[in-house]
Amino acid sequence: MSLPSKKIILEHFDEKDAVMAGVIRRVGSFKLKRNQNYFQVLCKAIVGQQISIKAAESINHRFQNLFTNNRPTPKKVQGLQEKQLREVGLSGQKVKYMKDLSEKFLDGTVRPHRMTYQDNEEIIQQLTQVYGIGRWTAEMFLIFSLNRMDVLPVGDLGLRAGVKLLYNMRAMPTQDRVRVLGRKWQPFATVGTWYTWRILDEEIIAY
């Protein structure tokens, strides 16, 4: 799936949200790198749950070093002992999440090759059958693995903090308020989210 051009994006946001259009002109082109190693993306998302980006990067680096070519696979994760996973910095809870994720890939509960033909909600329903994967993690997968253009992760603290700053709100916006704002971004909610993240951190997030 090719990403929309800057021209198409600007035409949309010039009409729907002038504030965001200004950000797009300031930040530059929309860049989203697709990672088709679906299992790896979900592992990284689990690592990143409820910890800082810096801590997540450190743990993920050590986690990937456990594998040949730094590429975790469901079979290899299943073969690791809990102690090995704890030693790289994963909590006991996240070890359980990783084990269940690998099991669900191996037993066919998660079928990544079908996802091309499924809509966002169908994929979220599939992924949230994995212990420890909630809506936020599934939405990160939709953005970074499948490059779906209309994802609005209202539970993401970075998105909410960026919206607060960008639209000069006095308090952190509720998920409902972000959802209402995001309607103006459709069908490019992912694009609006990506540029909002850039307000807080110029580094481009990748999974």
Image: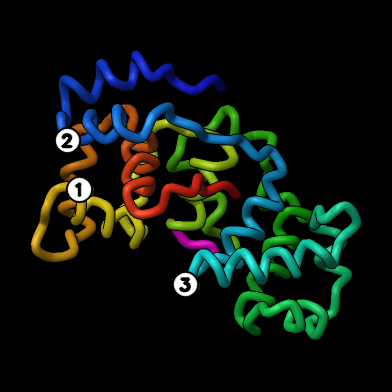
Q: Which numbered disc, 3 or 1, marks the residue closer to the eye?
A: 1
Is residue 134 a member of the stretch shown in magenta?
yes
**Is residue 73 at all visible to an observer of this figure?**
no
Q: Is residue 142 above or below residue 49?
A: above
Q: Quick check: 139 above or below 8?
A: below
What amino acid is found at the position of numbered circle 2 in the picture?
A: Val
Give the magenta range: 131-135
Q: Which element carries disc 1, helix, strand or loop? A: helix
In the visual, does 167 lie left or right of 73?
left
Query: What residue is at 12 percent from the left and 65 percent from the top?
Result: 171
In this rendering, position of residue 1 left or right of residue 82: left
Identify residue for label 2.
19
Residue at which label 1 appears: 166
Q: Quadrant of residue 46?
A: bottom right
Asked if the residue under mark 1 is in contact with the one under mark 3, i.e. CB atoms within 8 Å, the reply is no
- Say whether residue 1 is magenta: no
Cα distance between the residues tagged 2 and 1: 8 Å
Q: Could you say where residue 33 lies in the image, as x and y percent from the top left? A: 58, 35
Main SS of residues in magenta: loop
Q: How is the image coloured?
A: rainbow
Residue 148 drawn at (x, y percent): 47, 33
- Give the residue number, with chain letter if any, for mark 3: 50
Q: Secondary structure at mark 2?
A: helix
Measure the C-alpha gap from mark 3 to mark 1: 23 Å
CA gap between label 3 and label 2 equals 29 Å
Q: Residue at left 20%, top 54%?
A: 165
Q: Which is more N-terminal, label 2 or label 3?
A: 2
